[in-house]
């Protein structure tokens, strides 16, 4: 079936109402297509269109979905392929254009996007809010239902433990285009409303429990369920979970930093149901840079994830940002502290963002150490002493 393409400009009639959309993510081989076929066959929905992204020239998944739909006689209106690259690139407008064309052509009840195995759902989501050449944003026409991530417990735990077993952390700049596989897997888990542990019936129970524990430590918002060979209750997929606030902030570290809700003493905050501890390190003195980097590159026992801002004596006017995922550490300077911009006349005090007003100091402004650590059985007292020892 050929697909007509539409351009959304100032003269294009705007469709009435919003179209439901669900984005399906997960690494290669997690069973996205299998789950999607099962959902289409069992859901009973009458007007569903599917958009399948693949980074290769031949979209095998799209062919499988078409074939399955024909065999089961389901009311799948259209399967559209995107093979021009990964849809999570914010500069790629193909996804928005494809979604708009599907809305105009079929007025679907639901659009399901199957992302490529290497797509980051956070970037996919953000790309839908980028205006086109006419200033139109496809997000204005969408009712987000779910950001679903499929995880193979065996594979995820294996890659996690492999990364953790390395004796020394790999240090990368934030701008380094290289992305370790474990970073991709973590990013897919962190931006989701529903995490499906696929092939759970083929895993040791201890592995499934470990995968669930790691997933919960990374995402405090998502519902986590187990699936077997794509056999998931369609209602679990249909039921709306997306929340404009909670989903983007479902990442545990982001939620904790944003809400400033955890203590920053030696005890941290424990989530007893999963044995997860969160600890926020804060200080108002700069770090000695080389000492701080050396400390962060060594293993803090039990740490699963860390993210936050740091103040360094190497570039004291610039805000540093770090991200620790498994055994990969990214650290770099992102821009000037807001206080520095105020001192230089580029900003004024009355322009302080609400998020910074909560941490603003009359003397230091927003210069600070504010790093969230998430882990299991972390030695917080030792970590506190080591980090305090970096202060100048």
Image (tube, rainbow, N blue to C red):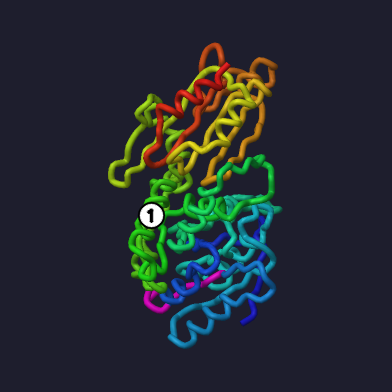
**What residue did someone put label 1 on?**
210
The C terminus lies in which quarter of the figure? top right
Whether 250 is drawn above or below 283: the answer is below
Residue 107 within the magenta-colored segment of the rendering: no
Whether residue 52 is situated above or below residue 251 in the rendered picture: below
- In the image, farthest residue toward the left: 273
Q: Answer with the quarter of the image where residue 173 lies.
A: top right
Q: Which of 174 and 74 is in front in this view?
A: 174
The quadrant in which the N terminus is found is: bottom right
What is the x, y in percent for residue 98? 62, 66
Q: In this rendering, is residue 382 above or below 362?
A: below
| Residue 45 located within the stretch drawn in magenta | yes
* Residue 21 seen in render: no
Q: How many marks?
A: 1
- Over which residues does the magenta segment extend? 41-51
Residue 206 % position (x, y): 34, 59
């Amino acid at each position: 079936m050929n697909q007509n393409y539409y351009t959304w400009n100032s003269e294009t009639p705007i469709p009435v109402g919003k179209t439901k959309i669900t984005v399906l993510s997960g690494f290669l081989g997690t069973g996205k297509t299998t789950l999607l076929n099962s959902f289409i066959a069992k859901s009973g929905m009458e007007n569903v269109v599917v958009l399948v992204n693949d980074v290769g020239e031949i979209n095998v998944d799209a062919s499988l979905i078409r074939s399955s739909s024909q065999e089961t006689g389901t009311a799948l209106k259209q399967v559209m392929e995107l093979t021009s690259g990964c849809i999570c690139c914010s500069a790629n407008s193909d996804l928005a254009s494809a979604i708009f064309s599907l809305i105009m052509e079929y007025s679907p009840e639901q659009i399901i996007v199957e992302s490529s195995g290497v797509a980051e759902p956070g970037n996919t989501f953000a790309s839908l809010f980028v205006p086109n050449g006419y200033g139109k944003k496809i997000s204005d026409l969408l009712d987000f239902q779910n950001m679903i991530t499929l995880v193979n417990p065996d594979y995820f735990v294996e890659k996690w433990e492999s990364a953790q077993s390395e004796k020394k952390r790999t240090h990368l700049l934030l701008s380094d285009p290289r992305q370790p596989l474990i970073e991709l897997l973590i990013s897919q888990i962190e931006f989701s409303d529903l995490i499906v542990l696929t092939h759970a019936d083929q895993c040791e129970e201890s592995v499934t429990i470990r995968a669930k524990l790691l997933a919960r430590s990374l995402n405090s918002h998502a519902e986590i369920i187990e699936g077997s060979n794509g056999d998931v209750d369609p209602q679990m997929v249909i039921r709306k979970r997306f929340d404009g606030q909670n989903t983007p902030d479902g990442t545990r570290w982001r939620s904790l930093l944003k809400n400033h809700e955890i203590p920053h003493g030696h005890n941290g905050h424990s989530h007893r149901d999963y044995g997860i501890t969160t600890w926020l390190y804060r200080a108002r003195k700069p770090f000695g840079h080389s000492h701080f980097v050396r400390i962060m590159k060594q293993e803090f026992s039990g740490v699963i994830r860390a993210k936050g801002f740091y103040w360094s004596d190497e570039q004291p006017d610039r805000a540093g940002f770090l991200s620790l995922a498994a055994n990969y550490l990214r650290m770099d300077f992102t821009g000037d502290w807001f206080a520095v911009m105020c001192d230089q006349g580029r900003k004024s005090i009355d322009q302080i963002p609400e998020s910074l007003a909560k941490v603003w100091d009359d003397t230091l402004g927003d210069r600070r150490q504010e790093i969230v650590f998430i882990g299991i059985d972390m030695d917080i007292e030792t970590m506190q002493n080591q980090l305090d020892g970096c202060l100048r």
